[in-house]
Amino acid sequence: MRKITYLIGLLVAFGLLAQDKTAMKYAKTITADDLKAHLSVLASDAYEGRETGQKGQKMAAEYIAKHFESLGFEAPVDGSYFQKFDLTESAIGSVYLRRGDDKKVGFEDFVYYSSSETSGEEYIKVIVADEKEEEADYNGKYVVFTADKLGGLQEKAEKAKEAGAGGVIVILKDDQEFQSFITRYSPYLKRPSLQMDGRDNESNKLIIGDMSMASWMFDKEFSAIAAGDEAQVIFNADYLDKPVGTENVLGFLKGTEKPDEVLVITAHYDHVGIINGEIHNGADDDGSGTVTVLEIAEAFSNAAAKKKGPKRSILFMTVTGEEKGLLGSRYYTDTDPIFPLENTVANLNIDMVGRVDDAHSENSDYIYLIGSDKLSQELHNLSENMNETYTNLELDYTYNDENDPNRFYYRSDHYNFAKNNVPIIFYFNGTHPDYHKATDTVDKIDFETMEKRARLVFYTGWEIANRAERIKADKIKEEKVSGE
């Protein structure tokens, strides 16, 4: 009996060792050179910043689909790699405030932001807030707040709305602050917006102006304007709406033993397009995550070709519309989950993994992990073990803190899985000065570091897909995770 037990122990040990060597063999196919080759295409000027619904995004979708096809993956959307859906594009038209024939023009004299319905010219009553008043009743009026800086706007706007305000007008007392704001943000806020469900009539109507605009509205010197003062002006905001088609890109590798259990590996392949004539290539955000998915997919495909395919199925999904509000992943989870969410064992989401932030300038061998322990301690422990066994990166949990003011946990595509109680890990390199700028280019990517991070995701996915038991969501609360 002792000999039999010993032999079984040897066989088990040998099997585990072989699995480790197999994982290492295919992880090595993920290389810095291959990552660079893919990214040099997808983040090139030819792809025009991959704006959702535009030419460059469509080109990127075709590139990704052809890669999945070359790997022999199933096309899981009724024989297609594309999960197509429509969004509503809203382009802002004429925006102004008017008193008689005298106008203040939107994005020149003030900034306007809202996704609410508009109906052409309307008289609005304007009242200066009494911030000491605890229980105001604004009854549809636009409430004026003054501020030195823009901090705390959301809280003020929400309180005014709760008190019945029809909109909020913020007057910046610092002229330099206002000029900086209007110069920096007008190009973004004038750009067409995209919505999945049409207009959000619960959205605040927000106007940001300067002291001269306040004097103009109330027809008196700014210093003479006091709490409770009222005025009436005409406000106009027109939008031109049209449908815009876009698509997630899905490649499916069927599991050998438990095909109904699905691991989903995601990244968003859209970016912000062309702004003020400058192409925003989005090399790090999120070209880096997209090409990491492509390389991990190829590693698993190579293993499957040698009959070493994963026991569980893997869905490789690059999603659209992340920059517009996590729209592509929300469409998948909330409208058309190609594979039932109850059969989805985990989501590994990769969003910005190609750069090194200032906090790690002395040691680039790190990655921020967010959310690994939110729903599953087992997933967190597995992730730690894979890193300790294979990659030895510094796993930084700074942004995993519940009190993190950046709230990154709610700001990438994993969140749409997490809110449906699917365990997730979000891989992130942190922010940098080129974030959402035209300077986020391929030449600034650290491909050697990116290779190590990609291999960590691969090893984690390998273990999730091949372990005997599916990952347990052992920290689910009675209510779904709530976000912004």
Image (tube, rainbow, N blue to C red):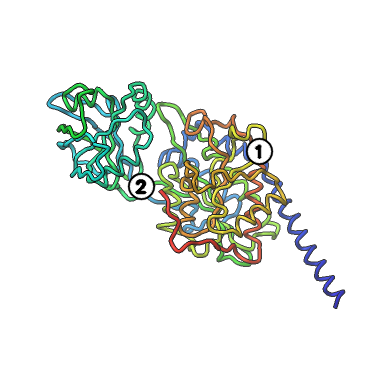
Verify CB contact (< 8 Å) between mark 2 and mark 1. Answer: no
Question: Which amino acid type is shown beneath numbered disc 2?
Answer: Leu
Which residue does the image show at 59% across and 32% down from the upper left?
358
Left or right relative to 220: residue 371: right
Question: How far apart, in angstroms, are the residues tagged by discs 2 and 1?
Answer: 36 Å
What is the three-letter code of the residue carrying label 1?
Thr
Residue 164, percent from left and from top: 22, 46
Q: Is residue 458 above or below residue 165?
A: below
Residue receiving disc 1: 449
Dot 2 falls on a residue whose secondary structure is: strand
- The picture places residue 239, in percent across and down from the top left corner, at 26, 38
Q: Earlier in the sequence, mark 2 or mark 1?
A: 2
List x then y, in percent, for residue 70.
Answer: 59, 49
Q: Position of residue 17 (x, y in %)?
A: 77, 59
Which residue is painted at 61% across and 60% down in the image?
A: 378
Q: Which mark, by number, is residue 87?
A: 2
Q: Nearer the viewer, residue 179 or 447?
A: 179
Foreground residue among 230 and 275: 230
